Image (spheres, rainbow, N blue to C red):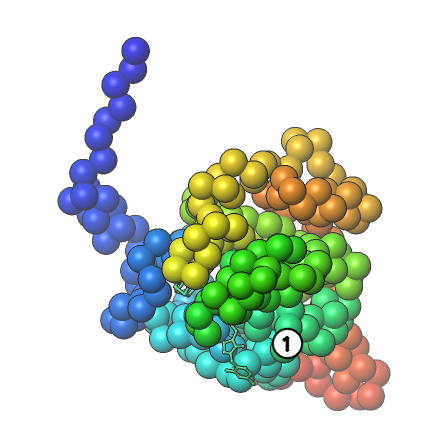
Amino acid sequence: MSIEHPVYLEDKLEQIRTSGRLHYRSKSLPTWCPGCGYYSMTEGVTWALNEIGTANEDVVVVSGIGCASRFPFFMETYGFHTLHGRTLPVATGIKLANENLTVIVVGGDGDGFAIGGGHIPHVARRNVDITYLLFDNGIYGLTKGQVSPTSALGFKTPTSPFQNQDEPLNPLAMLLAYGSSWVGQAYAGRPDHLAEMIRGAIKHRGFSYLHILSPCVTFDKTDRTYRRLDLEVRDLPDNHDSRDRLAAMSEASTTDRPALGVFYNEQRRTLGDALDAVVEKAGGVPRRLAVRQ
Ligand SMILES: Cc1ncc(C[n+]2csc(CCOP(=O)(O)OP(=O)(O)O)c2C)c(N)n1
Ligand code: SF4
Ligand SMILES: [Mg+2]
């Protein structure tokens, strides 16, 4: 029988202190509820930026409204706390103004798929070179527990005592259909895998959409809990071909056993490339060269 080495708090703290990732955290302490998956997401983003080696001043974190909205305050990077559902147009503008920036959008299922749902198809089809970290807890957490577009049918919340009567959306299938060039799924209860997925999404050249399953531990005690998600999630099969959009669509359809990993990944022209080509055609200096001067 092997005896596992115990993990001491001091060792863990020392490990975090010397890892370099605290460099990306501001002095403001997060205010999320203890146990919320937003902590895993913050850890994942700082780990990924540190691994990639991006300079603090080259990163912009964009949030909307919801529990994710204060995310930029906790980061030692540039940030933009925008309006409810309006993260993607703002992020598109930032990226087009300066192609050298790493633009990371953070937001919830309500922010993204309810009020902001009209923007997603267009950033996906135009392949805007930004990363969208969509935190799906299947509920409006900030406003204390209304159902969201991804809530399960029959889900009972404080404001839906007679249960949710609406079928949930399938965000992964939507993103694949919209033409997103990188689509992945992770789970806040597997923080190491989540961090690697965030790194992959940021490194992708083009629009990357990472769907992050996470419980709202305060307002959902019955449905999307850690206990349940721990049992439901699975890895994508080893032989999954992430260049095959139809195979990705098929995996996205098994919503009762959500798969974790990179569903789809392709390299193609970004919106920035397309605009540069137009500028060149018109006899101007492509923006990519202009911003480097
Ligand atoms: C224009 C507008 N409509 C409605 C609201 C109220 N509101 C604030 S956050 C929110 C939903 C947030 O849910 P989600 O995006 O899932 O984020 P979570 O808090 O669950 O992370 C709503 C409806 C608002 N702030 N602004
Ligand atoms: S209300 Fe829910 S989503 Fe918001 S911080 Fe608390 S646990 Fe997280
Ligand atoms: Mg939510």
Identify the residue under disc 1. 116
At x 25%, y 18%, the residue is 3
Classify residue 138 by image quadrant: bottom right
Q: Nearer the viewer, residue 242 or 259?
A: 259
Q: State left or right for residue 149 relative to residue 122.
A: left
Q: Quadrant of the C terminus?
A: bottom right
Q: Which residue sits furthest left?
A: 10
Q: Position of residue 75 (x, y in %)?
A: 36, 70
Q: Amino acid at mark 1?
A: Gly
Q: State left or right for residue 191 relative to residue 115.
A: left
Q: Position of residue 23 (x, y in %)?
A: 31, 63
Q: Answer above or below: position of 215 versus 69.
A: above
Q: Which residue sits furthest top?
A: 1
Q: How many marks?
A: 1
At x 56%, y 38%, the residue is 232
Q: State left or right for residue 70 relative to residue 134.
A: left
At x 70%, y 42%, the residue is 254
Q: Nearer the viewer, residue 256 or 7?
A: 256
Q: Position of residue 44 (x, y in %)?
A: 43, 54
Mark 1 neighbour class, 10 Å CA radius: few under 14, some 14 to 19, many 20 or more = many
Q: Quadrant of the N terminus?
A: top left
Q: State left or right for residue 71 relative to residue 228.
A: left
User: Cβ(mark 1) to ligand 1 < 8 Å?
Assistant: no
Asked if one can make out residue 99 in the rendered structure from this viewpoint, the answer is: no
At x 45%, y 41%, the residue is 227
Asked if one can make out residue 274 in the rendered structure from this viewpoint, the answer is: yes
Q: Answer above or below: position of 2 versus 91.
A: above
Q: Position of residue 165 (x, y in %)?
A: 67, 62
Q: Secondary structure at mark 1?
A: loop
